[in-house]
């Protein structure tokens, strides 16, 4: 096999989060990757001359997993069995990020329904805003860090197609590869983390809350133990897999009439900087009455940041929404944002970034 081959011993665990501290602090191994971030189920460690893949749940123990680019094994996964019965999986070393086909659904997630907060990566608390994740095509998380101060994070990156961080409450300091020193996101600010850009969360205020969008829903977080941030060179125009880093601040907002009647929109420039992979708008109440509309976007997600409204959808009972609630509108479903309060403010994320809103 080639020199790029990596082998991992696969073991099972019933308490992955508890085992992370054991393997890193007690055994002195380094964590190399973890996923998913909101509720970790798999973590990979390296040390003492071996790599260990720890998976939560039941399954065959003592399995060997080999990642290689060796043409002998082709481009897909190969399953082998040793004479003594040991199972061996051989996979391509660099698995591509594949976007699942969207399973469209009308989804409403209310904060008042008290969905559980789950402790995820780096001790952050996650609340799932799209429980079925539209067939694995997207994950939307409401993330909070209850106590402010330094965040126990490391330099890492995500094998992802698109990722948004929108600061909802408080502030957070983050540092990014090739983007200079630490960046402070205040409430209303946002960044996109292009695929595989190295970064690290440094510090947060008390009560910090962010909305994080990831596409696809399941993607791997990998630790980079070799890179130190900040990097020595400033490259603000660098492109990662067709996407540029975006830091959009609310204080510089320019508001224009939205395609949605009765609202104005702040364009975060994310559509332009991702080649229309995704679009992110902040909407707020304006003049005029909201009307019935429908859209042709593949994914159309909205989070209520402030105020109240009644979401009306064809063939569905009206739902009263307030701050902290979220919803997904599938393509061609007629909806209306009825009875909006004067302070209604919405975060809208769509894939693709450019789509058409039809009246009626």
Image (tube, rainbow, N blue to C red):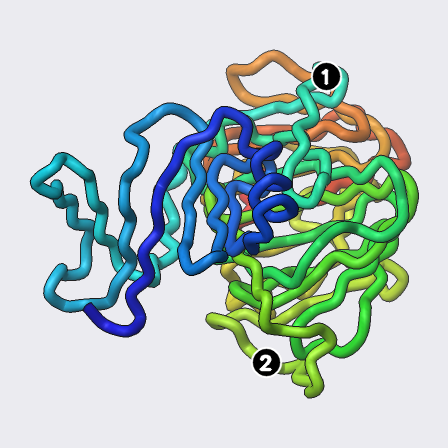
- Helix, strand or loop at mark 1: loop
Q: CA distance from mark 1 to mark 2?
A: 41 Å
Image x and y of residue 249, in percent: 82, 62
Give the structural element (helix, strand or loop) at label 2. loop
Q: Is residue 180 above or below residue 278?
A: below
Residue found 62% across the figure and 73% down from its top: 227
Q: Nearer the viewer, residue 294 or 329?
A: 329
Q: Tell me which numbered mark, 1 or 2, is placed earlier along the sequence.
A: 1
Left or right: residue 281 versus residue 58 is right
Q: Is residue 315 left or right of residue 26?
A: left
Residue at the far top in the pictured view? 317
The quadrant the N terminus occupies is bottom left
- The circle on residue 238 is 2
The quarter of the picture where residue 139 lies is top right
Residue 241 vertical position relative to residue 309 in the rendered view, above or below:
below
Locate residue 156, reporting x and y percent: 60, 60
Seen in the picture, residue 332 relative to 253 is either above or below; the reply is: above
Q: Which mark is residue 209?
A: none
Q: Which residue corresponds to mark 1? A: 114
Instruction: Tell me if mark 1 has few (under 14), some (14-19) or many (20+) residues whose alpha carbon lies within 10 angstroms of its own.
Output: few
> Which residue is depicted at the point 65% across and 63% down?
155
- The x, y position of residue 81, in whole percent, is 12, 41
For residue 354, say whether it is visible. Answer: no
Front-lying residue, 95 or 153? 153
Q: Residue at the location (41% across, 32% down)? A: 12
Task: Tell me residue 13's x, y (percent).
Answer: 46, 29
- Residues 217 and 46: in front is 46
Q: Residues within 10 Å of mark 2 (few under 14, many from 20)?
A: some
């Amino acid at each position: 096999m080639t020199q790029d081959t990596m082998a991992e011993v696969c073991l099972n665990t019933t308490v992955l989060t508890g085992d992370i501290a054991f393997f890193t602090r007690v055994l002195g191994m380094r964590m190399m990757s973890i996923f998913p971030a909101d509720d970790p189920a798999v973590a990979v460690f390296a040390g003492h001359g071996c790599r260990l893949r720890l998976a939560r749940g039941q399954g065959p123990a003592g399995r060997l997993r080999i990642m290689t680019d060796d043409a002998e094994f082709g481009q897909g996964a190969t399953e082998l069995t040793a004479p003594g019965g040991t199972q061996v999986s051989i996979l391509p070393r660099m698995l591509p990020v594949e976007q699942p086909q969207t399973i469209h659904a009308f989804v409403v997630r209310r904060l008042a329904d008290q969905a559980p907060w789950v402790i995820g990566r780096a001790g952050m608390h996650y609340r799932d805003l799209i429980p079925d994740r539209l067939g694995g095509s997207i994950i939307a998380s409401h993330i909070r860090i209850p106590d402010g101060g330094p965040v126990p994070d490391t330099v890492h990156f995500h094998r992802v197609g698109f990722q948004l961080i929108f600061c909802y409450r408080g502030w957070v300091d983050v540092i990014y590869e090739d983007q200079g020193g630490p960046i402070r996101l205040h409430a209303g600010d946002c960044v996109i983390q292009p695929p595989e850009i190295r970064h690290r969360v440094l510090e947060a205020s008390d009560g910090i809350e962010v909305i994080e969008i990831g596409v696809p829903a399941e993607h791997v977080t990998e630790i980079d133990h070799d890179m130190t941030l900040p990097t020595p060179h400033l490259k603000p125009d660098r492109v990662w897999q067709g996407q540029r880093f975006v830091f959009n601040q609310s204080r510089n907002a320019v508001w224009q009439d939205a395609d949605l009647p009765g609202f104005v929109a702040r364009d975060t420039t994310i559509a332009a900087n991702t080649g229309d992979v995704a679009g992110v708008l902040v909407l707020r109440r304006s003049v005029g009455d909201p009307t019935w509309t429908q859209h042709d976007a593949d994914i159309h997600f909205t989070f209520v940041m402030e105020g109240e409204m009644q979401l009306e959808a064809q063939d569905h009972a009206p739902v009263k929404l307030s701050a902290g609630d979220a919803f997904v509108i599938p393509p061609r479903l007629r909806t209306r944002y009825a009875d909006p309060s004067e302070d209604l403010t919405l975060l809208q994320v769509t894939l693709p970034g450019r789509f058409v809103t039809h009246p009626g």
